[in-house]
Image (cartoon, grey):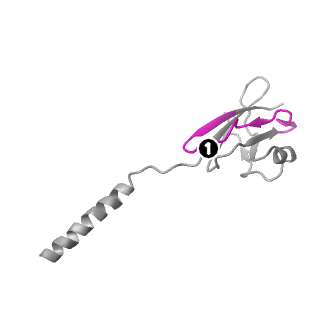
Amino acid sequence: MGRNLRILTLLLPLSLLLTLSGCFETDNPPQLEVSVIDQDSLPVPDAYVTLFTSQQEWRQLENPVQAWRRTGLEGQVLFIDLKETTYWIYCRKGDQDNSFDEITTQGDLKLNQRAHVVVHLR
């Protein structure tokens, strides 16, 4: 009986620790929601959006961070699993884009947060 009690005394705190470790929240990567609007401030569906980590890549449209995303009916796209950095946003639909308006996230994105940026197509 003494041996079983010692084993139980060792296993009980370990099982409690393992149970509680699943209760703690983990950090989620930053997210970025982009809303694309036209000159009348109306949502632009079916516009293509991507992100870059430098102004030079944005200007040259080279090395996007993730695949191009297409806006839905409300003119929005969501990028997930991003890094904590600043992003340059490029949007286009047909012959309109935001190449004359350098749009960034206005600073580094943060863990556990969803940033939002509005982009005008011209």
Q: Nearer the viewer, residue 66 or 112?
A: 112
How far across and how far down the image is residue 91, in percent? 78, 39
Answer whether residue 98 is magenta in the image. Answer: yes
Q: Is residue 111 magenta?
A: yes
Residue found at the far left of this picture = 1
Q: Amino acid at mark 1?
A: Gln
Chain part drawn in magenta: 93-117
Q: Kindly identify the residue that appears in the image at 21 percent across and 67 percent down.
A: 9
Q: Is residue 40 left or right of residue 28?
A: right
Count the numbered circles shown: 1
Measuring from the top left, give residue 1's x and y in whole percent: 11, 76
Q: Main secondary structure of the magenta part?
A: loop
65 versus 105 height, above or below: below
**Position of 114 compared to 64: left or right?**
left
* Residue in view at x 48 percent, y 51 percent: 26
Q: Which residue is at a point 70% across and 40% down the rendered structure image?
A: 71
> Is residue 10 toward the left or the right of residue 83 in the image?
left
Instruction: Specify the quadrant of the image occupied by residue 34.
Output: top right
Secondary structure at badge 1 equals strand
**Residue 59 rendering spot, x and y as whole percentages:** 86, 43
Query: Which residue in the structure is indicated by mark 1?
Result: 31
Q: Residue 16 at x, y = what percent?
A: 29, 59
The image quadrant that residue 47 belongs to is top right
For the point 82% across and 35% down, the residue is 98
Q: Which quadrant would the C terminus be assigned to in this image?
A: top right
Q: Is residue 54 left or right of residue 14?
A: right
- Is the residue marked by circle 1 packed among few (<14), some (14-19), or many (20+) residues within 10 Å? many
As drawn, 95 above or below 16: above
Q: Quadrant of residue 106?
A: top right
